[in-house]
Image (tube, helix red, strand yellow):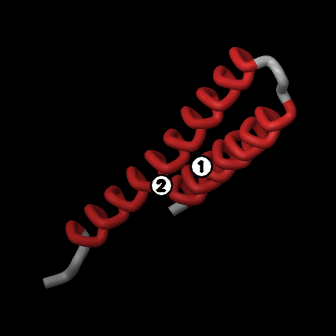
Amino acid sequence: MRIDYAIIGISIILLAGSMYLAGLSLQITDVSTRVETVKYATYLFVASIALLVFMAVISLIKKTLLKPE
């Protein structure tokens, strides 16, 4: 159960980093730097969502395997 909380924590940290970079990109005037910043923000966002989906799938697998019949 603690691993689930760790995965949620890492996902929240990645999501916060993504929002920070997205906000930072709005203040950048150089177009190439702005594109790179948005690209990294997108990578962090996708990674956070992938971790949450991974955790949900693992949780469902645990529930089905440990379900008493």
Instruction: Tell me which amino acid carries mark 2.
Output: Leu
Q: Which x, y percent locates residue 17?
A: 72, 40
Q: Mark 1 points at which residue?
A: 11
Residue drawn 72% across the image and 40% down it: 22
Q: How many callouts does the rendering have? A: 2
**Which residue reaches farthest bottom?**
69
Mark sitting on residue 47? none
Left-right relation of 8 to 64: right
Distance (Cα) linking label 1 and label 2: 7 Å
Q: Do the residues labelled 1 and 2 touch (CB within 8 Å)?
A: yes
Q: Name the residue under label 2.
A: 52
Q: What element carries label 1?
A: helix
Q: Quadrant of the C terminus?
A: bottom left
Whether 31 is drawn above or below 20: the answer is: above
Residue drawn 77% across the image and 33% down it: 25
Instruction: Tell me which amino acid carries mark 1.
Output: Ser
Whether 44 is drawn above or below 66: the answer is: above
Q: Nearer the viewer, residue 52 or 44?
A: 44
Q: Which x, y percent locates residue 26?
A: 80, 37
Q: What element carries label 2?
A: helix
Q: Which x, y percent locates residue 2?
A: 56, 58
Please tell me in which quadrant of the rendered image residue 18 appears: top right
Q: Residues within 10 Å of mark 1 (few under 14, many from 20)?
A: many
Q: How crowded is mark 2: few (under 14 residues within 10 Å), some or many (20 or more)?
A: some
Q: Which x, y percent locates residue 61?
A: 26, 62
